[in-house]
Amino acid sequence: MPPKRIDTLEPEFKAKIEKLLAAAEAATGRKWIITDGRRTMAAQRAIYAQGRTKPGKVVSNAPAGASAHNYGLAADLAPLMEMTSQIDWAAPRSLWKQMANIAVEMGLTAGYYFRTIFDAPHVEDPRWKEQRELWKAGKVDIP
């Protein structure tokens, strides 16, 4: 059985995401879930190819190694529809913005505010680039 998405995150970041989920639920009155956590390099390559060399719209500007997801320091969150367990991808922007603002208050970076691509579900630890440098130097192994 694969691990829960939250369990793929680095421990300190996981704790922040647990707090963010609870705070977003309290602020919006909606349950929030994690739709994506740590990604392998292969998974990131596939996502980056979407809208470029594979069908679909572009959903990421980050090639493999350039995503905080590769280091367990990013998560994608989404609200559930009221009274259901279905993800509400069409939730109003104001709902996504509430979650993003809470994330920013917690010291995280929110994809809602990215300048090059709108990525409302995405939150990341701004220190992920330190891990990327360790990976580039061959000091961290990322599958």
Image (cartoon, grey):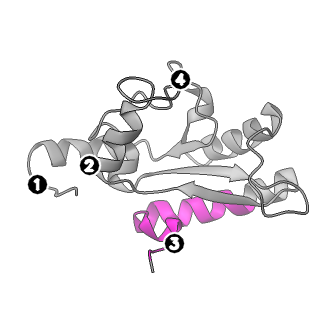
How many other residues sit within 10 Å of disc 1, few (<14), some (14-19) or many (≥20)? few
The tag earlier along the polypeptide, 1 or 4, is: 4
SS of the residue under disc 1: loop
- Seen in the picture, residue 6 relative to 55 is either above or below; the reply is below
Query: In the rendered view of the protein, which quadrant contains the C terminus?
Result: bottom left
Q: Quadrant location of residue 51? A: top left
Q: Which residue is mark 3?
A: 4
Q: Is residue 81 left or right of residue 110?
A: right
The span picked out in magenta is 2-22
Of mark 1 and mark 2, the one earlier in the sequence is 2
Q: Which mark is residue 131?
A: 2
Whole-Å distance between the Cαs marked 3 and 2?
Answer: 22 Å
To which residue does mark 4 refer? 117
Query: Cα distance, mark 1 to mark 4?
Result: 30 Å
Residue of label 1: 139
> Of 90 and 129, which appears nearest the observer?
90
